[in-house]
Amino acid sequence: MNLVNYKPCVCNLCGTGCGQFLKTDGHKVYGVSPLIAHPVSKGKLCIRGWHSNELLSTNERITTPLIRENGELREASYDEAIALVAARMQGFDGAAGEIGVLASARSSNEDSFTLARLTRDVFKSTLRGIGAEAGHRKSMAALEHAFGYPGAHGSLTAIDHADYILVVGTDITRQNPVIGGNIHAAQRRGARVVTLSSSRTQIAKLSTKHFQEKPGTLGLLVNALGKALMAIRTVNHDRRANIDQLPGYADYAAALRSISSVALERASGIRYEEIEEEAHHLEQARSIVILFSSGISGLDRPTIDAITNLALLSDRMDHPHSAVIPVAGISNLQGSFDMGMSGELGNSVFKALATPDSRIRALFVIDHDDGIIRDKERIAALDFVVYACAYKSAFMELADVVFPLPAYNETDGTYTASDKRVQITHKNVDSRHHVLPGWSLFERIANTSGQHWGYHSATQVFKDIAAHTRGYGDLSHELLSKGFGQHWNPKGFAGCGRRKFNAINIEYWESPTTPEFPFALMIGKAQHYWHQNNLMRKTIVPRREYDQTLWLYPQGYIEISPDDATRLKVRDKWLVNVRSSIGTHMKIAVKISPDVQDGTAYIPYFIKNMISDFLLPYENAYAAGEESVIPIQIQE
Amino acid sequence: MSMSMYILSSGEISALVTELQASYDVYGPQVEPQTKQVFFDQLATPAALDLEAPIPSMPVKEILFPQMERILKYKYDAENQSVAMSKQYFERPKALFGLRPCDLSGILVLDRFFLGQEFVDDVYLTHRRQCLLISNTCLHPFPQCFCVCTHSGPDADEGFDLDLTKLQDGYLLRVGSEKGQAIADAHQWQVATPLHAKEFKAVVDRSIDLFPEMATDNKAWVAKVMNRITTGFVKQETWEYIGDQCFECGACSFVCPTCSCFNIEDTQTPCGECERLRMRDSCSFEGYARMAGDHNPRQPVEDRRNKRFFCKLSYPQSKKYLRPGCVGCGRCQWVCPGDIGLPNVVQYIRREITGGQN
Ligand code: SF4
Ligand code: SF4
Ligand code: SF4
Ligand code: SF4
């Protein structure tokens, strides 16, 4: 009998990368403990992390390769399934865009790196993508322009020391609760925490100052802050002479100067005087951390540009406790980008699936995220679909061949958190059914297709990652095993150290609402479950919490303000008719919330599966992320 | 019974562990080598035991009331219309070697909850029966300890079979039960002298002196705060202020030596059997507090919070458990992402009472 012990690893349930212990005898996981010495999580975990043992011991696992025969999936050996995949894939012309590969932002770097190699060298395809990549690509592009490399500037640990923390948009205590906790702790030690958010989120309540802007004006607000800061600088011009030498400054400054305080107030509902006051605090801070959410719920490019510009304008970005961090909802979103699994601009697998006359005929998918459901019919009509995942999911129904994968604690692997911290998780449980790790599965497919990579361990794969991936050159499994990870080194990028302003346009966003459709509907936040539903549905306590919401609001709910409820003459949980400006409609329960502004309405993201008919025509609204708005009317 | 006392060398302590391992699963504090985090886990060897390690990061209740355990397996046979059932928890004698007094007090509170009421919890009883409890006096508090306010440390005064205190000459071993005496009787340990008893008292007094002022100062306040909570005088704004800081992670309940909420769930295994799982739960979760009927009496998060503090710090509850529900270990303070561990809550209510001074 093996003794039950606590084994350290990294939580894989969001891009914070908290340290956690799993209590295990090497066969099963019995419990979880937080890891006190971890520099970011410092002994904290959120509801997801605390219940990962439930996920890791679910019976809803894929345990063996499966092959579809006469319409049914049947068990198969690895040899048979791999041979079938290799043979069928050779029948497609990858170079001509016939093979698409969809990676998972939860996979380890080792898996994503080998998958990228399989895509490139074996499938000869450039058609690839990662779930939730669209939003993150915008963050990467803006950051690379500003700082010279595609990744966060600075570390999440800067939150613990910074003078000033700006949270732009994100409902961070829900999405990345442990980061939210660190911000709260910073506020309590005296840092100035400022949240810009159209609804009164929990972090807004815990902030020193909350600017509750009208929807769609987040970027404008950040730019207004820039204008006010620049104005102070003009008076104090003895300091920071060289910011105005940076490329793009003149255009940026001109754009800022053009902001009219009257138009600002009309569009955003915020008075410029308030912003001026805030700029004085910003000016006095020696270190500044800016956080915004990146990925499926991320901001649009102009807003991210406004953020990086403000960061540069502050001239505090060289301080060790300053940072600009695109906070990812999914554990290894950053790493999957670093490993090259993101589709090149305009050539992603998502686009191929969405374009009716694209040449795509075969699809190779790891995990899957909600977004893909949109393309279900197209996928069902493809010639050949391969699916690999640790857990059973509806996607199996679309697949011709299915492969099991290990859970994150059943194999060695590295993961790159939102702030570029690369951390290692060592295998602490035997995968129950001799499941091959992703990198080994991909290597065997390559092998069967006539290519010999010669990887025998994840450690060896990582050596190749270090040799071929910019920023990763200094890292190795050995090094990462010693502490709590290490940030990848931006000096791996030639542009590292440069500073450039992004080009911005000042637009006074006009709400698309009309007298007939007077409410601005936003799709957003959902308690506990952001992006993680596929996994959280397999837990017990978090799932019950999710069901609890459904139980109270079986039709889903739309959050409106108390005053609007009075005007509409509706009470909490009453069903209302919601009609959108393009004619879709649904019946949904009202949830009255004092945290919502008049004239706005929220539907939690996770309710999407219940009201997909209503939202599906608004694909673009998803693409636009957190700031997207749908004009609606609500009737009793 | 009058308490016998002995003096043991470190060698005799190790020998005792080895000896106990023959008939018990022996658990004790040990330091995880990579992270230096302390866990109260089963000992592979006597050498793994570290009696000087700080308070374990997870409460010892983990052994008697684990985060998740399989308690039952059953299979329905449709043909014969019968159910085959087998229990999945088994009795193994356990020696808990080197319990911090607060964790010992926690076990006594759980005993009252699981065993001392109308229904006796069979699973808990099975783990708890044949347990040997060996406590270990804290020579100094660890950061966040405040057991002096809750009468549960730094030394143990009830509930142990054997109790250890490190003195100049070795470990003072106090016997607290017949079971403990039987073990002592089987050894030729050196009997302690009155001087040792005196030194023990001095060691405990010194330890109490070492508590930070905040903790000792809070002592009187815990009683006042309990009064305030029991009589319902805490202002709604204070609860809201606390509630706004709760991230609903459940951590405070998971690490608390006295929290006993749990959930039962049946899950299907791939081979058609059903497993009954029991897992720890938390009153901070909306779903836990749900009651039958279409309303949730504690829906706003601040109300769920006040339930937990009510449970830890009110007279009806402490009467039920014959002591405050909180044993002062401070763990909830260190795992709470919202900064509302129990000591802080005492501070907030205290601030309300004093009108902001202090
Ligand atoms: S914040 Fe993210 S990484 Fe941390 S415990 Fe929660 S899900 Fe895991
Ligand atoms: S309430 Fe907090 S300090 Fe008190 S016993 Fe529980 S975990 Fe320890
Ligand atoms: S709370 Fe008291 S009994 Fe518990 S570890 Fe700290 S000092 Fe020891
Ligand atoms: S640990 Fe803190 S944040 Fe988590 S449930 Fe308890 S009080 Fe709330």
Image (cartoon, helix red, strand yellow):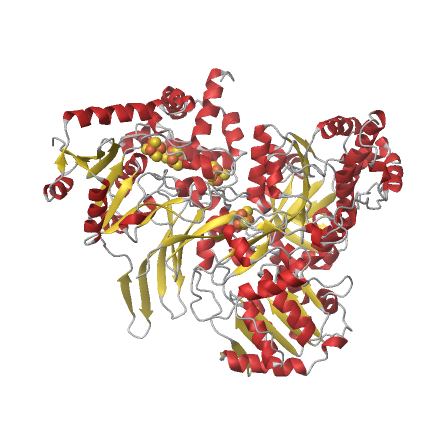
Residue B97: image x %, image y %? 26, 43
Residue A211: image x %, image y %? 70, 33
- At 53% from the left and 82% from the top, the residue drawn is A80
Residue A548: image x %, image y %? 50, 49
- At 89% from the left and 36% from the top, the residue drawn is A258
The quadrant of the picture showing ligand 2 is: top left
On-image quarter of the C terminus of chain A = top right
- At 63% from the left and 72% from the top, the residue drawn is A364
- At 73% from the left and 65% from the top, the residue drawn is A348
Residue A602: image x %, image y %? 66, 45
Figure check: A76 above or below B43: below
- Quadrant of the rendered image containing residue A400: bottom right
Asked whether A257 or A396 is in front, the reply is A257
Count of labels shown? 0
Asked whether A456 or A607 is in front, the reply is A456
For residue A5, side relative to residue B350 (left or right): left
On-image quarter of the N terminus of chain A = bottom left
For residue A351, side relative to residue B139 (left or right): right
- Quadrant of the rendered image containing residue A161: top right
- Quadrant of the rendered image containing residue B7: top left
Regarding residue A517, the answer to whether it shows in the image is: no
Regarding residue A159, the answer to whether it shows in the image is: yes
For residue A542, side relative to residue A30 (left or right): right
